[in-house]
Image (cartoon, helix red, strand yellow):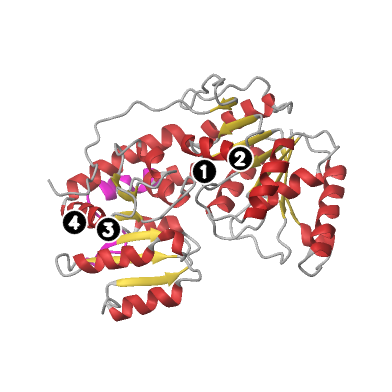
Amino acid sequence: MNIVLLVSSMGTGGAERVASTLVNAWAGRGDTVTLVITYSGRGTCFYTLTSQVRLIYLTDLAGRKRLGPRGYAARLRALRTLLCDSKPDVVISFLTNVNISAILASRGLRVPVIVCEHNDPAADGRSRLWRLACRLLYPRASLAAVLTENVVAPFRQMVPRMARVAVMPNPLPDELFDRADRGGLARERGVTEHGDGRRRLVSVGRLHEQKQYDLLIAVFGSLADAFPEWDLWIWGDGPERARLEAQVAGAALKERVFLPGKTVDPWAEMARSDLFVLSSRFEGLPMALMEAMGLGMATIAFDCRSGPRELMRAGSDGWLVPPGDAYGMEQGLRRLFSDDALRAELGRRAARSIRERFSAQAVLDMWDAEFERVGARPRRAGAAVSAAMPAVPPDSSRGDIRQPARQPALVNIQRVDKEPT
């Protein structure tokens, strides 16, 4: 099958990692795959792509026009020309602005277009203009894919005329599970790769107010004296760096809290750590949390509306904290810092659960089912949704929706309440 995937950039973000995983997997099984980077500044490709993937920077075709109506129109014309020349069986686009461009550029070409939302549309702060554009243009797409079941209702409020909505989770590459297999025994024994006798609490993400790293640093500071062997490492960069560095300095935590910037190998940094934390206000389906769990790490996260609950299966595979609850986060970290056996058990559960639900093959089977629904024919005709992630029949009360079945709930041994028991 001939697949064209559009993405704004290929930096260090979660959507970009998903894009690289998908195009590599499709190309690896024999599909013709083109990855188009639409960002006007071109940028670079952070993630490794197989040589079988055709990589195109749209700005190379459209020219380096100034930002504004003329520059956008030039890129739109270049994208339409590319689609006409490529004759894809299906076009997939990631993130709001690219989704709009994909719909406009493909109009009249009779090619199925699948638009993908990678965040919670009710919480990501998009402007009224973008909300209006989504409301008006998204229904022209063949299918809209969202990451979690909880996002379906707010998405339908934003785009009430969207005929087809599917819950399509992010995949994890096989390489991650290979690394998990190699490192599992050491983690089970409580041995981490840094070898300096220190314990590491780690987070990976953009230094942005969405991630609430200021709250995380404050919570860690309240525990620092009680747990002198633990340090906090936050990998990533972004607009909040100066403010966070000032907070660390003001709290006299420069020897305990580290903001080393971006890393080319986040899995290695996770492998060097003992516990992963996600402190976000909102998410889509957070890749860093999913990767940490896939690597067999114990994890703790705020139960923001979309993402952590689905990944952790309502607290069975990780420690969930009520959204924004600093006290709950402190109590959860206190327990996990002091209990090696509990961290090991959560890591084992997480690795098994994530592998079953989010392996590349399981998610590709889901994509194949959706390709057939929109009229594109996958190379492996008749591919069925993986048994690990079966489809649910359409719910007539919400329109034509397909989503993975809920996993059976396990005992929620790690739920944190706001009040101490």
Q: Amino acid at mark 3?
A: Ala
Q: Amino acid at mark 1?
A: Pro
Measuring from the top left, give residue 317's x and y in whole percent.
31, 39
Magenta span contains residue 181 = yes
- Front label number (4 vs 3): 3
Q: Secondary structure at mark 3?
A: helix
Q: Earlier in the sequence, mark 4 or mark 2?
A: 2
Residue denoted by label 3: 326
The answer to which image quadrant residue 106 occupies is top right
Residue denoted by label 4: 334
Are discs 4 and 1 less than 8 Å apart at CB?
no
- Front label number (4 vs 1): 4
Q: Which residues are magenta?
A: 180-200
Q: 132 and 228: which one is in front? A: 132
Q: Amino acid at mark 4?
A: Arg
Q: Earlier in the sequence, mark 3 or mark 1?
A: 1
Residue denoted by label 2: 25
Query: Rounded to the nearest whole Å, what is the CA distance between mark 3 and mark 1?
Result: 33 Å
User: What residue do we see at 60% from left, 49% from top?
Assistant: 20
Q: Does residue 224 lie above or below 383 as drawn?
A: below
**Quarter the C terminus occupies:** top left
- Front label number (3 vs 1): 3
Query: Rounded to the nearest whole Å, what is the CA distance between mark 2 and mark 1?
Result: 8 Å
Residue denoted by label 1: 173
